Amino acid sequence: MVQLGWDTVVTTPKSAAGRRTITLDAETVTVLKSWRHRQRQERLKAGQAWVESGRVFTHPDGTGLHPGWVSALFTRIAAEADLPPISLHGLRHGAASLSLAAGVDVKVVSAELGHSTTSFTQDTYQSVFPDVAKAAAEATAALVPLKARTGG
């Protein structure tokens, strides 16, 4: 989905890498199944007024949510929760960085993001978190015998 001004257009992804299956964790799958159940109930309640948009997240009548509306809602919820300002796209960066920091292979992260090269993923998303940098320093130091490090 692409936003052009305030209009939205459903189109094909920019590249072949953009066509992909996204793997979700079990907790997210559970939340989405619960949402699907709620949406089915909304569909029954709406009856003939239901609009089949094919979208996962909709208004109670099935019409699609406008990306700008979703972004504004997200910004408001984050502010009300006293979280630092971040955009929905910023969450993509954060998720990619956290995956890499958790030790997920860069090829997997790159595929999940729809990138055609791992170098782009690393250059764009790989941030070094302080805990990760500390662990790397400790792991590197552990390779050098203690006597060599202490001069003894």
Image (cartoon, rainbow, N blue to C red):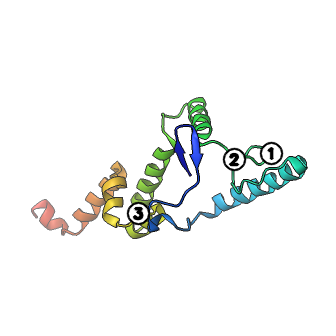
- Relative placement, left or right, of 96 versus 148 is right
Label 1 Cα neighbours within 10 Å, binned few <14 / some 14-19 / many ≥20: some
Residue at disc 3, secondary structure? loop
Q: Nearer the viewer, residue 138 or 70?
A: 70
Above or below 48: residue 120: below
Callout 2 touching callout 3 (CB < 8 Å): no
Instruction: Give me the residue at 12% from left, 66% from top.
Output: 148
| Spatial separation of the CA atoms under disc 2 and disc 3 | 27 Å
Residue 65 image offset from top left, x and y in percent: 67, 44
Q: Hey, what amino acid is under mark 3?
A: His
The residue lying at 30 percent from left, 54 percent from top is 133
Give the residue number, with chain letter if any, for mark 2. 64
Residue 89 in percent (x, y) is at 48, 46
Mark drawn on residue 115:
3
Please name the amino acid that badge 1 sits on: Asp
Q: CA distance from mark 2 to mark 1?
A: 9 Å
Residue nearest the observer in this picture, 116 or 12: 12
What is the three-letter code of the residue carrying label 2?
Gly
Q: Of label 1 and label 3, which has the lower sequence position?
A: 1
